[in-house]
Image (spheres, coloured by chain):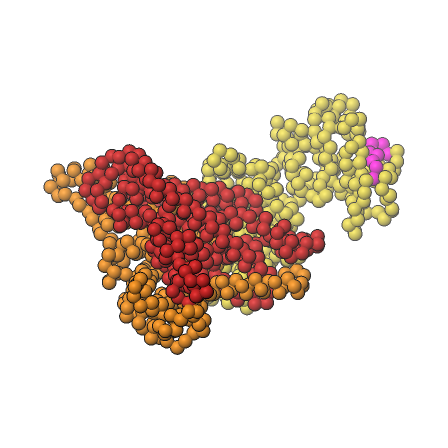
């Protein structure tokens, strides 16, 4: 078990930079998920930790030791691959035990260990089968067992569940959690699925276009997104985001003639921003409520416990979560409002979060110093 | 062909490649370069000095009428044998692709000619076509003297071509069948839904869709008719009667090894090599484009 | 097959039956004629039914062309070419596909180009190289002036020579010096997912271990296909052994004997013996193809593209 430290790690392919200087420390025993859209460099980062990809610049330390020039086998990491990467010609037992065989472990010892690990993931009856004779979920388990058997210092997961169906994915997720709880091994998990990320992670690293956008707990990332990208990327349905400008009279102006009474004082006057409100924070209001936005209902998506109202105002789409049971006909006029503490502001120039100074009662204890406006 | 995962070693890959590279350098690149050298020099047969001859060897080859008739004969041979063989194989493949009961057995047998050595087929066909023996020769009983490939050059050439075409059936069949089976089932089903009958679908769907394979096979067949014809001709006609079945490879062999005209044979080899290279090039271009389609 | 059309089914069977006759006729004729007596085979028109003289004809052909040692020679050449090819092809394809090194593309193209010119096309120069396989190295030394240098320094004149005429290496090596197998292996290696390489790296195995424990077992089908192709190819060689062996008695191959089996112009037309001999000579590759069909069809198709 070891901490992993990345010091301005960069990856360059020919001339293009795919990972732009990442600085992160992953604590010993922590479960960290790297989340981002495809092509953001998250897999590359993971593979650099594994030693499968050369590090163009910077340093990676595992357990306090620089591993840049170590072979994968010398780094003490085990990895679960996206398509399992099982050896098709070996049995389940052969697959799980291969690393031990390469390491020169005696057969008797090896068999005992393979059996123990296989039992812990429920594969003990499949040891003589070949990967081709297993279901997707079982293959996934073999891949995990193969990683576990070496008792690694670090577990690496490269989108391991992307080939499974939705139900299995949920099951494997809790299995991975259980595994981590039992073994307490430092784990790095790469995914593009935010639900997977939110449910698994102690902390998230959110990446976009080769840069780290935010590092934080799932709750921090959700409630205080550090950038417009994170705000948009995390949460389903996505956050409502409207581009506009603050004026000196306490209004936020957007679109052709949209105005919202948001008074943030003179320091924001003339500032171009994106204003964001999560759909679950948008509330319906009585007509005539001051500051309410009137919008026409385009359609309503029924989700069972709640529903999503898609409405438009001034050419801007507004999504709201509604839990009432009233009928909402398409084309009808609704009014929406939101609390000021639910509002997120992001600078137009760099997309970074702008602290509004409005206290959020739900998170009043959380320190605000980790998110500062980048000038 | 780029891999994300590979090994970074400097000497190991060379060690792995060494035997293969050494062999092709000694038995491919060296001789090919040698042929170029000889083609432009005049050499005493099997050793002795050689003097620079420039284009003389080529000129004397090209000025030889017999050479040109060999070239034309080779082209005729190549095209007719290829067309015959491919047409037969394609027909068989189209019907074998229908996967009726027992087709597997037919498919297995249709490949057999691939296994046969050209001279073995040559001997068998020589017997079948022998004017004295009782197969094709039986027609001489009815019309005396009508069939005699040992004196009739046209019949001799036809006999060799038929044999060559037969030999190629197995190889062509394998490729045609694979190409046909590579056509998505749904396409054929869509054709059937559009009301096309089986024969119609063959013409409108299957043939156009296997066009890349057809072209690929065409080139391969042409090349093999230059190269594999030796064994056939040597066992069936030895180039006769009066040179009627003398094709390029046979002439090279004859001029070089029997006539000991090394430089002339080298010049002829160069011409043949160029033809084969051009054909291979066309083929590679086409295969590339085909990959693009898929 | 989509719809049931009786007439079309009948046409299908008819065409396949005709095809069967066309394909099988020569085999049948060889077998039938090989089993007949001299009188039977000389009958016009000939009977297309086998007779009972197959074994005496075979033994006549056997002694006439000394077939025993010739078949052994053929087998040595075929097995030599097949194993040599498989080993070389697997190694070189492994280097080209799984290593990143300077000169990788150069080696790739050097090997690739050899596909262009079959042995028959470059028969004349290849023959002269076989007379001294070390000639290229001698010329290299001569050209770079090393021979003269060494001679002036040590007084020893370097004269390398290795005559391959009338030798198994001479019959085998030039047939291995092509790219067919390398490409078959390359095509196969390219389908190995990157993750498998990485998984083995994570498991701690190096390149050679990966080669022997993962790649080789995985490419078994591929190997069988290549073995079939190369066996047929080398057994059926005619022109090359004809040139390289002047000592027919000791180094002749079975296929070379076919011509000797043909009845002489004015001799006895004992085609029955010819056919019995031909039957024996063409049987080994035919058996190999028939038994290995499943694998070899797959290999044949990927090797040429």
In the figure, is residue A316 to the left or right of A158? Answer: right
Please tell me which residue lies in front, C93 or B146.
B146
The region drawn magenta spans A289-297
Is A81 included in the stretch rendered in magenta?
no
Residue A4 is situated, as x and y percent measured from the top left of the image, at: 50, 45
Quarter where residue A368 is shown: top right
Find the residue positioned furthest to the left. Answer: C155
Please tell me which residue lies in front, C96 or A230.
C96
Residue C96 is situated, as x and y percent measured from the top left of the image, at: 41, 47
Residue at image position (53%, 63%) is C18
In the figure, is residue A55 to the left or right of C6? Answer: left
Q: Is residue C113 above or below residue B106?
A: above
Please tell me which residue lies in front, B232 or A280.
B232
Residue at image position (38%, 51%) is B245
Chain for colour yellow: A
Chain for colour red: B
Residue at image position (85%, 39%) is A331
Res A209 visible = yes
Chain for colour orange: C
Res C86 visible = no
Residue C94 is situated, as x and y percent measured from the top left of the image, at: 40, 51
């Amino acid at each position: 078990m070891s901490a992993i430290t990345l010091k301005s790690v960069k990856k360059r392919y020919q001339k293009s930079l795919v990972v732009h200087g990442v600085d992160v420390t992953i604590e010993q025993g922590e479960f960290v998920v790297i989340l981002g859209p495809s092509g953001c460099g998250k897999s590359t980062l993971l593979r650099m930790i594994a030693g499968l990809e050369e590090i163009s610049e910077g340093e990676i330390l595992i357990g306090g030791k620089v591993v840049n020039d170590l072979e994968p086998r010398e780094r003490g990491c085990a990895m679960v691959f996206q398509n399992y990467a099982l050896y098709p010609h070996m049995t389940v037992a052969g697959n799980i035990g291969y690393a031990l065989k390469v390491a020169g472990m005696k057969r008797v010892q090896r068999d005992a260990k393979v059996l123990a690990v296989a039992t812990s993931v429920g594969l003990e009856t499949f040891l003589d089968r070949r990967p081709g004779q297993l279901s997707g979920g079982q293959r996934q388990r073999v891949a995990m067992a193969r990683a576990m058997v070496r008792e690694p210092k670090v577990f690496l997961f490269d989108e391991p569940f992307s080939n499974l169906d939705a139900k299995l994915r949920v099951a494997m997720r809790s299995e991975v959690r259980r595994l981590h709880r039992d073994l307490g091994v430092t784990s790095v998990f790469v995914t593009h699925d935010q639900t997977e990320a939110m449910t698994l992670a102690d902390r998230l690293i959110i990446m976009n276009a080769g840069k780290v956008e935010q590092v934080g707990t799932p709750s921090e990332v959700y409630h205080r997104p550090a950038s417009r990208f994170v705000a948009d990327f995390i949460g389903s349905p996505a956050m409502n985001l409207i581009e506009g400008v603050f004026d000196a009279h306490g209004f936020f102006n957007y679109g052709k003639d949209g105005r919202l009474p948001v008074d943030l004082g003179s320091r924001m006057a003339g500032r171009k921003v994106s204003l964001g409100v999560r759909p679950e924070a948008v509330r319906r209001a009585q007509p005539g409520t001051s500051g309410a936005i009137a919008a026409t209902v385009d359609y309503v998506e029924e989700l069972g416990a709640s529903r999503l109202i898609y409405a438009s105002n001034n050419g801007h789409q507004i999504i709201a979560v509604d839990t009432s049971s009233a009928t909402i006909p398409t084309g009808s006029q609704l009014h929406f409002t939101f609390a000021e503490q639910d509002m997120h502001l992001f600078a137009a120039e760099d997309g970074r979060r702008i602290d509004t100074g409005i206290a959020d009662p739900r998170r009043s204890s959380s320190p605000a110093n980790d998110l500062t406006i980048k000038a | 062909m780029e891999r994300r995962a590979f090994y970074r070693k400097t000497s190991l890959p060379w060690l792995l490649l060494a035997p293969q590279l050494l062999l092709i350098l000694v038995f491919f690149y060296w001789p090919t370069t040698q042929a170029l050298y000889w083609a432009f020099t005049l050499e005493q047969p099997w050793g002795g000095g050689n003097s620079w001859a420039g284009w003389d060897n080529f000129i004397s080859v090209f000025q030889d009428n017999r050479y040109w008739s060999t070239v034309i004969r080779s082209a005729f041979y190549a095209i007719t044998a290829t067309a015959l063989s491919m047409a037969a194989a394609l027909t068989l493949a189209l019907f074998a692709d229908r996967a009726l009961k027992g087709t597997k057995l037919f498919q297995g047998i249709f490949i057999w000619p691939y296994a046969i050595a050209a001279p073995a087929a040559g001997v068998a066909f020589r017997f079948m076509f022998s004017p004295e023996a009782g197969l094709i020769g039986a027609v001489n009983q009815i019309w005396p003297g009508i069939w005699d490939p040992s004196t009739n050059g046209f019949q001799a050439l036809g006999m060799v071509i038929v044999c060559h075409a037969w030999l190629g059936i197995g190889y062509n069949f394998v490729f045609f069948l694979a190409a046909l089976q590579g056509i998505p089932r749904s396409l054929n089903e869509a054709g059937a839904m559009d009301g096309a009958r089986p024969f119609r679908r063959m013409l409108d769907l299957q043939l156009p869709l296997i066009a890349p394979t057809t072209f690929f096979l065409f080139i391969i067949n042409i090349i093999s008719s230059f190269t594999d014809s030796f064994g056939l001709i040597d066992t069936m006609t030895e180039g006769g009667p009066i040179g009627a079945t003398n094709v390029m490879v046979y002439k090279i062999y004859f001029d070089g090894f029997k006539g000991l005209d090394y430089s002339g044979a080298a010049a002829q080899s160069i011409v043949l090599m160029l033809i084969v290279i051009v054909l291979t090039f066309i083929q590679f271009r086409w295969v590339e484009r085909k990959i693009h389609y898929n | 097959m989509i719809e049931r059309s009786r007439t079309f089914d009948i046409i299908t069977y008819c065409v396949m039956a005709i095809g069967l006759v066309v394909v099988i006729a020569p085999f049948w004729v060889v077998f039938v004629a090989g089993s007949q007596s001299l009188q039977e085979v000389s009958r016009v028109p000939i009977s297309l039914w086998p007779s009972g003289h197959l074994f005496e004809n075979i033994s006549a052909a056997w002694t006439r062309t000394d077939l025993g040692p010739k078949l052994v020679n053929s087998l040595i050449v075929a097995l030599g070419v097949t194993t040599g090819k498989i080993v070389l092809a697997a190694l070189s394809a492994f280097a080209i596909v799984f290593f990143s090194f300077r000169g990788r593309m150069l080696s790739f193209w050097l090997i690739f180009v050899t596909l262009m010119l079959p042995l028959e096309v470059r028969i004349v120069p290849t023959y002269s190289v076989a007379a001294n396989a070390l000639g290229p190295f001698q010329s290299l030394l001569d050209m770079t002036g090393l021979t003269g240098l060494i001679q002036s320094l040590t007084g020893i004149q370097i004269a390398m020579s290795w005559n391959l005429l009338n030798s198994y290496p001479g019959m085998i090596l030039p047939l291995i010096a092509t790219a067919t197998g390398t490409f078959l292996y390359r095509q196969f290696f390219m389908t190995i997912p990157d993750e498998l390489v990485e998984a083995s790296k994570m498991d701690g195995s190096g390149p050679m271990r990966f080669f022997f424990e993962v790649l080789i077992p995985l490419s078994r089908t591929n190997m069988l296909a290549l073995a079939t192709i190369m066996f047929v190819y080398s057994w059926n060689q005619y022109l090359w052994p004809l040139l390289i062996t002047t000592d027919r008695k000791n180094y002749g191959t079975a296929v070379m004997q076919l011509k000797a089996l043909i009845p002489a112009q004015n001799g006895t037309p004992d085609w029955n013996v010819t056919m019995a001999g031909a039957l024996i000579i063409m049987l080994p590759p035919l058996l190999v193809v028939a038994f290995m069909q499943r694998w070899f069809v797959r290999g044949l198709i990927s090797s040429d593209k």
